[in-house]
């Protein structure tokens, strides 16, 4: 923890870790992670991001809301929810001691295209993952059906036209993540226009 990394090695080292345990970031560390998110490029300086933090019992409390919203989504498709599905939903946020919902409050009347406003919040998510890695924490960016559910958005104080860009899971990695293949070739993805 807290070992200095070069920016490049932190970027390359970052790996998603699905199960994270205590300790999560403390108040200062979480603030640094969110501040890193807010340092993302932001066309027009619209500050489209909102960060909703879930820790301790708030994760279970919100899990109950996720379970209800799943039940309603399935019901609207004429499907019945199973106990296993409900339990999975209830326990979702318990996969890490700290989860941050990164939301995009989108101004549809602005000259800056909405997709760029959303892109700024996606850049914020990535910055947060890098900051968490630099601080020695494990992290993972998740989305899933609740991200697109209006009742979930409403609970977070968002409008139907806003977006949940990601759920950033933060905590301590139980296992050492796999090293990213260091020599993955850039060639298939790059061309030089001439
Ligand atoms: C917008 C976005 C949403 C994602 N949502 C999920 C998700 O809900 N569940 C999941 O297992 N992985 C999800 N991922 C992928 C992981 O965050 C991760 O990038 C992937 O597992 C590859 O692992 P790595 O980050 O270690 O390369 C998402 C990635 C992005 C960019």
Image (spheres, grey):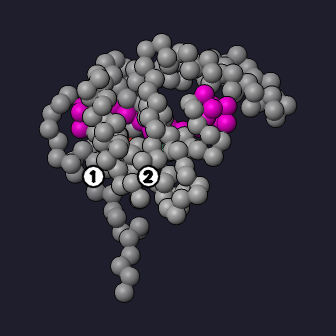
- x 38%, y 71%: residue: 190
Left or right of 155? Residue 79 is right
Do residues under tags 1 and 2 come within 8 Å of each other at their CB atoms? no
Image position, residue 155 (x, y; %): 60, 28
Left or right of 7? Residue 72 is right
Within the image, what quadrant is residue 193 found in?
bottom left
Quarter of the figure that contains the C terminus: bottom left
From this view, report whether residue 161 is shown above or below residue 190: above
Number of residues whose C-alpha sits closer than 10 Å to that of mark 2, classed few (under 14), some (14–19) or many (20 or more) = some
- x 21%, y 48%: residue: 7
Residue at disc 1, secondary structure: loop
The residues tagged by marks 1 and 2 sit, at their Cα atoms, a distance apart of: 36 Å
Camera sees residue 172: no
Q: Does 28 lie within the magenta span?
A: no
Number of residues whose C-alpha sits closer than 10 Å to that of mark 1, classed few (under 14), some (14–19) or many (20 or more) = few
Image position, residue 167 (x, y; %): 48, 35
Image position, residue 97 (x, y; %): 40, 20
Towards the viewer: 184 or 167: 167
From this view, report whether residue 193 is shown above or below residue 14: below
Image position, residue 186 (x, y; %): 34, 64
- x 27%, y 43%: residue: 13
> Which residue was labeled with disc 1?
182
Residue found at the far left of this picture: 4
Residue at disc 2, secondary structure: loop
Residue found at the far top of this picture: 57
Towards the viewer: 52 or 99: 52
Start-end of magenta stretch: 133-155
Mark 1 or 2 closer to N-term?
2
Towards the viewer: 183 or 133: 133
> Which residue was labeled with disc 2?
46
Towards the viewer: 191 or 162: 162
């Amino acid at each position: 923890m807290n070992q200095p990394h070069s920016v490049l090695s932190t970027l390359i080292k970052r790996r998603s870790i699905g199960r994270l345990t205590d300790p999560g970031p403390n108040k200062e560390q979480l603030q640094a992670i969110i501040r890193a998110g807010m340092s993302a490029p932001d066309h027009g300086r619209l500050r489209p991001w909102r960060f909703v933090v879930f820790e301790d019992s708030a994760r279970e409390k919100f899990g109950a809301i996720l379970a209800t919203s799943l039940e309603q989504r399935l019901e609207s498709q004429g499907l019945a929810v199973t106990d296993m599905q409900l339990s999975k939903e209830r326990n979702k946020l318990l996969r890490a001691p700290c989860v941050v919902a990164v939301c995009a409050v989108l101004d549809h009347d602005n000259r800056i295209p909405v997709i760029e406003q959303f892109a700024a919040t996606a850049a914020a998510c990535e910055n947060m993952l890098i900051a968490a890695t630099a601080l020695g924490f494990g992290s993972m960016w998740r989305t899933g059906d609740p991200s697109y559910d209006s009742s979930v958005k409403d609970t977070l104080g968002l409008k139907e036209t806003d977006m949940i860009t990601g759920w950033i899971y933060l905590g301590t990695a139980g296992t050492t993540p796999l090293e990213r293949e260091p020599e993955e070739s850039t060639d298939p993805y790059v061309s030089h226009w001439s």
